[in-house]
Amino acid sequence: MRLATWNVNSLRARLPRVQEWMADVRPDVLCMQETKLAEDAFPHMAFTELGYETVHHGQGQWNGVAIASRVGLTDEVRGFADGGEADPEARLVTATCGGVRVSSVYVPNGRALDNDHYTYKLAWMKRLLAHLERNQKPSDTVVVAGDFNIAPDDRDVYDPKKFVGKTHVSQAERDSLVALENWGLVDVFRRLHDQDRLFSWWDYRSGDFHQGRGMRIDLVMVSASVADRTRWTIVDRNARKGQQPSDHAPVLVDIDD
DNA sequence: ATGGTCGTTGCACGA
């Protein structure tokens, strides 16, 4: 199975690039974030034409997550299924695709360490763990892929000195990822690549992409049964080039059957 | 040191 995650930064603006990319790369499963579409505005037919079933959890204007699959798509769940109140923002959608329980996640940005949105981000990560604990076992075949808005360690930012006191790199954010790892998920890209500067996001401004100023914040977190079958993973930097790119590049994972 | 670019919507704000 070829699985990918891509923060498309508006599916309305990005649909031509996404269609072109899917026809070229042919992922079996694509997790998308930041569709920025209302629930019913998702262009399901555009994906049907390419051979994919889709599920979308949207709220219009901001956020919005989706999964496209050409290996089946069943048992969709929108948001957290942890017994708590509904998340006011559309940041999580889950479905079973080709025998894998797949979640597409868009973790809150956090904005600044003293911002309420940072508190929401940490609480959101805690709920994601509770959602996993309640609905899956570590021995299950699980993939949680998306824009985590967290750089797991200093290899994942272009200049750690510039990020002191900022979001995405704080110990509390990194600890929330470690909590997922303690439950049983593996950052499978990091398992297969130990180099620094292998980024998945670059600011649109100041030529950051061409200057190599980015972060690795788009992660494919997988359970052990998936990690042991993953032989190959890359960031498709070509998708960050050219006309009207997203500010994120897709991360691809090939999993043996 | 500062600001810069996109996306949304509507002329500001989030990322």
Image (cartoon, grey):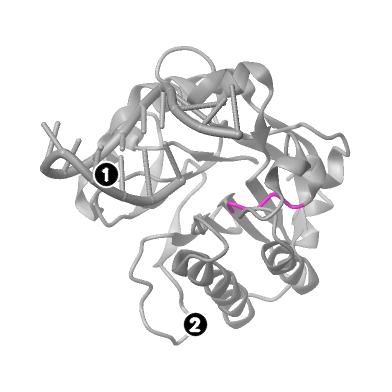
Please indicate, yes or no, whether residue A48 appears anywhere in the rendered image. no
* Marking on residue A42: 1
| Magenta stretch contains residue A114 | no
Furthest-bottom residue in view? A83
The lab-note entry on whether marks 2 and 1 share a chain reads: yes
Residue hosting label 2 = A82
Furthest-top residue in view? A242
The boundaries of the magenta stretch are A148-152
Q: Nearer the viewer, residue A155 or A189?
A: A155
Q: Can you give x and y, in whole percent of width and height, for residue A119 in the image?
A: 52, 72
Task: Using the rendered view, name the quadrant where residue A14 is placed.
Answer: top left
Task: Using the rendered view, name the quadrant where residue A90 is placed.
Answer: bottom left
* Marking on residue A25: none
Give, as a three-letter code, the residue at label 1: Phe
Q: Secondary structure at mark 1?
A: loop
Q: Can you give x and y, in whole percent of width and height, for residue A110 in the image?
A: 51, 59
Q: Nearer the viewer, residue A141 or A61?
A: A61
Q: Chain of mark 2?
A: A
Q: Can you give x and y, in whole percent of width and height, for residue B7 in the image?
A: 31, 33
Q: CA distance from mark 2 to mark 1?
A: 26 Å
| Residue at 54 percent of width and 76 percent of height | A127
Mark 1 crowd level (few <14, some 14–19, many ≥20, 10 Å Cα): many
| Residue at 85 percent of width and 47 percent of height | A191
Q: Secondary structure at mark 2?
A: loop
Q: Chain of mark 1?
A: A
User: Magenta span: helix, strand or loop, mainly?
Assistant: loop
